[in-house]
Image (cartoon, grey):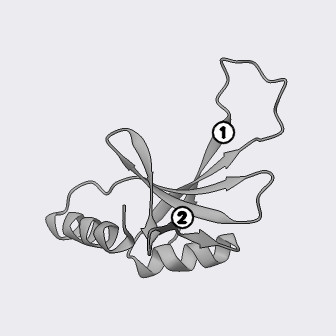
């Protein structure tokens, strides 16, 4: 999904007072960058800008971008790339809710 499409979608939901889509900040144990994705029809759709997935060097930069888009929360999805010996019934990732509201 292109960033401008995502921006229009979430602002339409805000105006209609409907439930916001779940937004994920995705990071892997072996990567030094974070990417954005939105849940669409029970699948994660990367948010793209100029046909490339949006990438960020730090979690703080991602949070700033999400706040600019008007979001109050997102989920940090951490993949454990090194868990080769885990049980097959365990999820290969962990979701942590991120609050984007200033305290």
Q: Residue furthest left?
A: 16
Q: Residue at x 70, y 18 (%)?
A: 88
Question: Mark 2 to mark 1: distance in Å?
Answer: 19 Å
* Residue 2 appears anywhere in the view: yes
Q: Residue at x 44, y 69 (%)?
A: 51
Counting the numbered discs, the total is 2
Q: Nearer the viewer, residue 87 or 31?
A: 31
| Residue located beneath label 1 in the image | 93
Q: Quadrant of the C terminus?
A: bottom right
Q: Nearer the viewer, residue 33 or 58?
A: 33
Compared to residue 48, the image places residue 89 above or below, namely above
Q: Residue at x 37, y 38 (%)?
A: 42
* Residue 72 appears anywhere in the view: no
Residue 37, position as x, y percentages in the image: 48, 57
- Residue 31's tag is none
Compared to residue 28, the image places residue 100 above or below, namely below
Q: Residue at x 68, y 48 (%)?
A: 78
Compared to residue 84, the image places residue 96 above or below, namely below
Q: Quadrant of the N terminus?
A: bottom left
| Residue located beneath label 2 in the image | 99
Other-residue count near label 1 (Cα within 10 Å), few / some / many at <14 / 14–19 / ≥20: some
Which type of secondary structure does the marked residue at label 1 adopt? strand
Which type of secondary structure does the marked residue at label 2 adopt? strand
Residue 22, position as x, y percentages in the image: 41, 52
Other-residue count near label 2 (Cα within 10 Å), few / some / many at <14 / 14–19 / ≥20: few
């Amino acid at each position: 999904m292109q960033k401008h499409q995502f921006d229009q979608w979430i602002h339409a939901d805000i105006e209609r007072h409907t439930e916001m889509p779940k937004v994920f900040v995705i990071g892997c144990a072996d990567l030094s960058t974070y990417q954005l994705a939105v849940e669409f029809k029970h699948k994660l759709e990367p948010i793209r800008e100029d046909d490339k997935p949006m990438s960020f060097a730090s979690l703080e930069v991602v949070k700033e971008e999400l706040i600019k888009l008007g979001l109050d929360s997102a989920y940090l999805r951490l993949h454990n790339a090194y868990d080769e010996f885990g049980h097959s019934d365990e999820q290969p990732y962990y979701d942590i809710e991120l609050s984007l509201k200033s305290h």
